[in-house]
Amino acid sequence: MKTRLAILGVGRWGTHLVRNFLAHPQAEVVAIADPMADNLTTIENKFSINPQSILLTSDWPTIKQEVDLDAIVVVTPASTHYPLIKDALASGYHVLAEKPLTVDPRECLELTRLAQQQQRQLMIDHTYLFHAAVNQGKVTLEAGKLGKLRYGYASRTHLGPVRQDVDALWDLAIHDISIFNHWLGEYPHQVQAQGKIWLQGDRRTALSPDGLADMVWVNLYYPSGFQATIHLCWCNPDKQRRLCVVGSEGTLIFDEMLKDEPLVLQQGYLQQQGEKFIPEGQEKQVISVEKAEPLKEVCDRFLESVRTNTVCDFSSGVVATKLVQILTCLSDSMRENGSLMTIPELDFDSNS
């Protein structure tokens, strides 16, 4: 039996989700909502949608009233997620939500507990965790080919688009933080961040009361002793999508800009000879990565989770809540000029 879906929000990313779910043999898209009529018209024409078979509407309450559903896909602004997802879970629907789950870790925790209570699936589209290169990178790390892990670094820069609702931290950091956490199998317990504002110092939000930072440096400190630094900027024409983990015997490099070689293991270590340290074992190994659309993998996994009613443990509400908590602590650190912030423990027990 196909999963009956409603998709809420059909901007740029929502359009990709519509494409994937319309083509999926285990999904039946029965409704699409967007407050902008032009977006609905674009979707209707782009995918030759028959409004007699798929409800096109401006709001979620109309869908609830008129259509039988199993699940919803939320691709609306993060500030709207909490009431939509809470209502959907309380009504007995499974939910796939665009990241971040919300911008408040307390709301994320509440939604995660509600999903547990309702025995419904709450999965978040952390797309990079479904990327073939990221998955193969985790396999490589777990094989111990880097020796003892020491530190990591990442750079995510480009020239626009410049957001007006969130700063560069909230726009960009979640990708690299989620990859580091996934690869290491742990979460940072302390964080630091410092930002620089050039363009929108007069645009203040609840998350960024001093203006929207255009460039941010992030430091993550993990319980194992591993440290990671992330450089984020949306006004740098040197576009980079590069993340590295360094160990005692090599470096694992995920470079999204190198389409033919996105994942490379650069092996090598230092051998002590007397008072000197000599480089040894230097070798570049290109790791084979399957060609696959990560978003298709997201849709596959969500439908499987709905069918079996089992949690996707690496992209669940728990994972999403911890990521939002990390981002919140990083924002706090920026407001306090880079102060070291300790991340508090969370209780995900739905009965508490």
Image: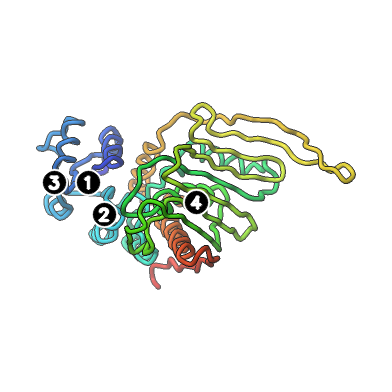
Amino acid identity at mark 4: Ile
Q: As drawn, is 64 to the left or to the right of 185? A: left
From where the camera sits, is residue 116 visible? no
Amino acid identity at mark 1: Ala
Distance, label 4 to label 3, CA atoms, is 36 Å
| Relative height, residue 255 to residue 347 (above, below) | above
Residue behind mark 4: 177
Residue at screen point 32% across, 58% down: 203
In the displayed orientation, state which residue is furthest to the right.
274
Q: As drawn, is 325 to the left or to the right of 200? A: right
Distance, label 1 to label 2, CA atoms, is 10 Å
Could you tell me which quadrant the C terminus lies in?
Answer: bottom left
> Which of the pair 1/295 is nearer the observer?
295
* Tag nearer the camera, 1 or 2: 1
| Number of the label disc, if any, that sits on residue 93 | 2
* Tag nearer the camera, 4 or 1: 4
Q: Residues within 10 Å of mark 3 (few under 14, many from 20)?
A: some
Amino acid identity at mark 2: Tyr
Q: Quick check: marks 3 and 1 in contact, CB under 8 Å?
A: no
* Sequence-earlier tag: 2 or 3: 3
As helix, strand or loop, the secondary structure at mark 3 comes to strand
* Sequence-earlier tag: 4 or 2: 2
Residue behind mark 1: 6
Q: Residues within 10 Å of mark 2 (few under 14, many from 20)?
A: many
Q: Quick check: marks 2 and 3 in contact, CB under 8 Å?
A: no
> Which of the pair 37/205 is nearer the observer?
205
